[in-house]
Image: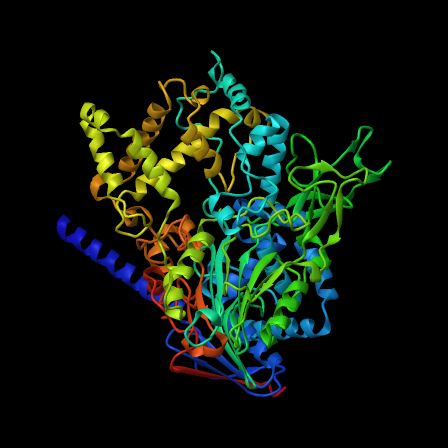
Amino acid sequence: MFKRGLFYTCLLSVVLIIIALAGGFLWLQQSSAQLDGEVSLNKLSAPVTVNSDGYGIPVIHATTRLDAVRSLGYLNARDRLFQMDLMRRKNAGRLAELFGQIALDSDIKARTYGFYRLANVIGNKLPAEHKAYLQAYADGVNSFISTTKTLPFEFTVLGYQPETWQIEDSILVALGMFDMLTAWTEEEERMLTVMEKTLPADIVAFLTPDTDRFTDSLLHNAPSARPIKPIPVAALHAALAPSRRVGNAFLPTNMSTNYVQLRDFFVGSNAWAVSGAKTHDGRAILANDMHLGLSVPTLWYRCEMNIGKARIAGVMLPGTPLLIAGSNEFIAWGSTNLSGDFLDLVSLEINPDNANEYKVGNDWQAFENIGESITVKGESPQQITVKHTIWGPVAPQPLLNKSVAIHWTALDSDAVNMGLMDLEAAQSLEQAVSIVNRAGGPQLNMLFADNSGHIAWTLMGKIPKRYGNDGAVSRSWANGNIGWQGYIDADELPRQINPPEGVLVSANDRRLGTQYPYTIGRQFADGYRAYRITQRLNELTAINEWSLFALQLDTESEPYRFYQQLALSVLSPKLIAQQPELGELRDYLLAWDGKANTDSLGFALLVKFRQQLAKSVFTPFLTAAKQADKDFDYSWTYIDVPLQALLTEKPASLLPDSHYADWNAFILGQLTHSAAQLKAKHPDKSLAELTWGNVNIARVKHPFSNAIPLLGWLLDMPENELAGCAACVRVAGADFGASERMVVSPAHLDEGILHIPAGQSAHPLSPYYRDQQAYWVHGLPISLLTGKSQHSLVFKPDAQ
C-alpha cells in the first residue's frame, strides 16, 4: 500500500508540474508579438506596411520619415520593451526600484552623473527636426504600451507597469552608450594618479606605453606621446626590495596575490573600408563588427526601411531611432570606439574651515548640494546628496583621500546631440563626414564607403582641447592653469578620404601620433587586430563581401607566439629527461596551430600562462601603489610590451620571486602552475585532448537567469564552443564578442551580409528569439536585406 501511495503521489506531482508548465507556456504565449493584421497608430499621415521575413526582421514601407520612425517605435516596443525600459531606468538611476539593494550602487552612480536631469537639458536644445523624430518614436512606443493586451512577461514577474516613453528617455539610452564606451577612463586616471604618487617616473613610463610593435608598424614608427621605454632596472629593483624583507606582509610565493587586471576584453570594434581600386568591379565595401558585452536580448535591433524611394538597412539601438551601423543606397557606415580620454578627475582643494566650500581662483565657492531619494524595493528609500562644482559632480569615491570632481564630455549638454540621425539621408562622403564631425555623442572612429567606390575615415564626438595637462593624472584646476578650452573644431578633426593604398582600418588602435596637436588618449587597443586585418587585406587576391566576412572570422593569434616560444625555451630536452612528466606540456604546446579555433590544442594553456605571468611578474613591483590605495590594480592594454621586455631580458636583480633560482625556473613555475589550474578546471579531459573550444564556451544569458538559474534552459542561449579570442580579429569570450557582423557595399545592398547573436525578438517563445545564434556561433552569413515576406502588418492612421 505504501509503494502504491508513493506511486500516486509521484504521479500527481508530475501531473501538477506538467499543468504548471503548460499554464506557464500559455501565459507566455499571450504576450507574443502581433506580426500580421492591422493596428491603429496615432498621428500617422498615411498607412505604413511592415513586412517581416523568416528571421522576424521588419521592412518598414512608409511615405515619410516621421511615419517610419513612429512605426519603428511601435516595433521596438513590441519586440524589446523590457530591454528599453531597463536601459532608461539604469541611466536614470532607477533600477533599485525593481531589484532592490543589489542595484543601489548602479543607481548612485547614475544619480551622481545626473543623466536624467541632463537629458531634459539636451532635449530642450535639440533642433526642431530632431525633436520631431524623437517625439514620433516616443508616440510609437506609447501606442504599443497603451494598446497591447499583454505586456512582455518580465513586467508581470516584477509586478510593474512601464511608464510613458518620453523624448528624454531616448536621450537617456544614448547617454548609456556614452557611459559604456567612455566612462572607463575614470579608472585609468585613478590608476595613473596612484602610480605617479607611489612609483618613480621611469617605472610609470615603462609600464604605460601607448604603442607596441604592431602599432608602430602600421604608423611607420611615427613618434607617440608615451613611447616604449627600456627597463628601468635600478628603479624596479628598489620597488621590488620591500617584498623581500623579513616580516613583510607581501609573500611572493602566494599565487593568489594579484594587483594586475588584464584588459583583454573591452568595448571596441573592428571596421574597415576597401575602395573600388581593390575590388573587381570598382565597388567600395565596408565591414564592421562591434565588440560588446553579450546578453539576451542582444543590444541591436535589425531593421530595413523604405521611405519613399529611399532604402536603409542596418542595426538600430532600441530606445532610439538611431541607425548605428548600416547603409542607404549612397553611403555605408560603421564605427569603432575611439578609446580615448574624455574625462578628467579634478582634484578639489577644500576649505579647511568649511568643508562645504572648494577653491576656485583665489576664492572659496560653496558646493551646490542636490538631494536624491532612491527608491529601493523592500527597503526604505536611500537618501544621498550629490555635491556639484563648476567642473562637475563630486565622485562618490575619493582619490588618495581627496575629493575629485568628474569633468566629462558626457555631462556637457553641448557635447551630446542626436545628429547621427542625419546620416541616414546622406548622399555623399562629404556630407557623411560633415555630419559625424558635428554630431555629439560617444567619441568614435567612423568609416564610410560610397556607391562610387570611395572610402573615408574620420572622428565623431566632441574631443576636449586641454591646456596645462594631458589628462592622464588628477590635478587641481583651482588656479586656472589647467583645464579645457572647449572642443576641437569640427574642421580640425582628422580625416582620410581615398588613401592611395585603397584601405582604411580601425580596430580601436592608435591612429595618430604626436604630429596631431591634441591629446586623444593613451590606452588604445594594442595594434594586433588592425595589423592582422591590414595584412590580410593586402594578401587577398579577391576582395568581395564574402572574403571580408571571412576576415571577420579570422582566428590567427600571432601575439601568443611569444608565449609559446617562451614556454618551449624552458622545456629543454635535458629538463624533460630529468622530469619526463613535463613532456606532456611540451607536446601540448607544440600542437598549437597558431589559431584560436574550437579544435586548437595548446592554446588554452598559452592563455592561462600569459595571465599567470602578468600577475606574477608585475605584482611584486606594485606593493607601494596597493598600500596607498586598496582598490589599485595595474591594468593596461599594452601590458605585453613591458611584460615581454622583462621576460626577454630577464634581469637577474628583478627576479619577481626569490624562491626560484633564476628567471627560467620562475617561468617554468608559472607554466606548471597554469597547467595545474587548467587540469583542475577540466578534470574530465587530459591535457593532450583539451581544445580551445572546451574552454571558450558561450554564456549569453538573460538577466533573469542569474537570479533564477532554473529558467536558464528557456531564457539563455546554448552554451556553444566558440572560436576566437581577445587577441584575434574574431573577438570572442564567454559573454563578450561581436554584437553584429556586417559587410556591405551601398551600390549592392542585395549582396550585403548582416547577422547578430541570439535573435530579433526578446520573447522566449518566439521563433525569432534564438534563430540567429547558430549563424553567429558558426560564422554563417545572413543577408543584409530581408528575405521573402512571411508576415504583413499594416499600421493605419488612428481615426480619432
- In the image, residue 40 sits, relative to residue 32, either above or below, namely below
| The quadrant where residue 777 appears | bottom left
Q: Residue at x 21, y 35 (%)?
A: 584
Of residue 544 and residue 104, the one placed in the foreground of this image is: 544
How was this image coloured? rainbow
Q: Give the side of residue 1 with respect to residue 128, left or right.
A: left
Count all numbered tags in the image, as a single digit.
0
Q: Residue furthest top?
A: 246
Q: Residue at x 20, y 32 (%)?
A: 583
Q: Is residue 238 visible from the viewing direction of this image?
A: yes
Q: Is residue 702 visible from the viewing direction of this image?
A: no
Q: Position of residue 302 (x, y in %)?
A: 47, 70
| The quadrant where residue 251 appears | top left
Q: Residue at x 35, y 66 (%)?
A: 25
| The quadrant where residue 741 appears | bottom left
- In the image, residue 526 sits, relative to residue 745, either above or below, namely above
Of residue 277 and residue 780, the one placed in the foreground of this image is: 277
Q: Position of residue 44 (x, y in %)?
A: 61, 83
Of residue 612 and residue 378, the one placed in the foreground of this image is: 612
Q: Give the side of residue 11 with respect to residue 653, left or right.
A: left
Q: Residue furthest right?
A: 362
Q: Give the side of residue 476 with respect to residue 766, left or right.
A: right
Q: Position of residue 518 (x, y in %)?
A: 68, 49
- In the image, residue 475 sits, relative to residue 721, either above or below, namely above
Q: Quadrant of the C terminus?
A: bottom right
